[in-house]
Amino acid sequence: MRKLTALLAVTALVAAIAAASALAATNVSWKVGATKTVRIHKGGTVKWIWSDRQPHNVKGPGFKSALRAKKGFSYSHRFRSKGTFKIICQVHSNMRTTVKVS
């Protein structure tokens, strides 16, 4: 009975760690010239954080943030399916993020 209890406890701990890592955001510093590739797991979140006072937005397949010009502003998106996603700032063509979801 102790072995079963220990096995169930370990299984619950592993499930909790997996759930917490899926909810943790991967941060991207969003400023003029920013180009980055991030890798996350299905269900993970990417958070873009404005690092300058220039106007930016975040646009990807099926989502788009508002245009903001405030340092420290952020926008998050959870990726619910696997694939490679190209994200841009519509104001600055040299600002891109590639999100690879496994």
Image: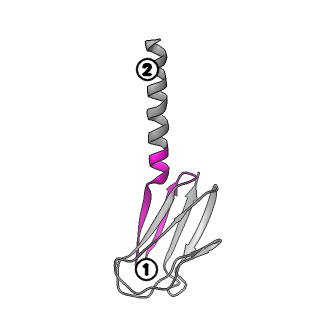
Residue 79 quadrant? bottom right
| Number of residues whose C-alpha sits closer than 10 Å to that of mark 2, classed few (under 14), some (14–19) or many (20 or more) | few
As drawn, is 98 to the left or to the right of 3?
right
Residue beneath label 2, please? 6
Instruction: Decide which of 38, 77 is in the foreground and name it.
Output: 77
Amino acid under disc 1? Gly
Q: Nearer the viewer, mark 2 or mark 1?
A: 2
Determine contact: label 2, label 1, CB under 8 Å.
no
Give the vertical position of 19 relative to 43 (above or below): above
Q: Secondary structure at mark 1?
A: loop
* Residue 11 pos. (x, y %): 49, 29
At 34% from the left edge and 81% from the top edge, which residue is drawn?
71
Residue linked to disc 1: 33
- Image coloring type: one colour
Please state if 77 lies on the left or on the right of 26 as rendered: right
For the residue labelled by badge 2, is the local secondary structure a helix, a strand or a loop? Answer: helix
Give, as a single range, the part of the protein colored magenta.
19-43
* Displayed quadrant of residue 98: bottom right
Counting from the top left corner in percent of width and height, residue 75 is at 46, 72
The residue depicted at 49 percent of the width and 45 percent of the height is: 19
Q: Residue furthest top?
A: 1
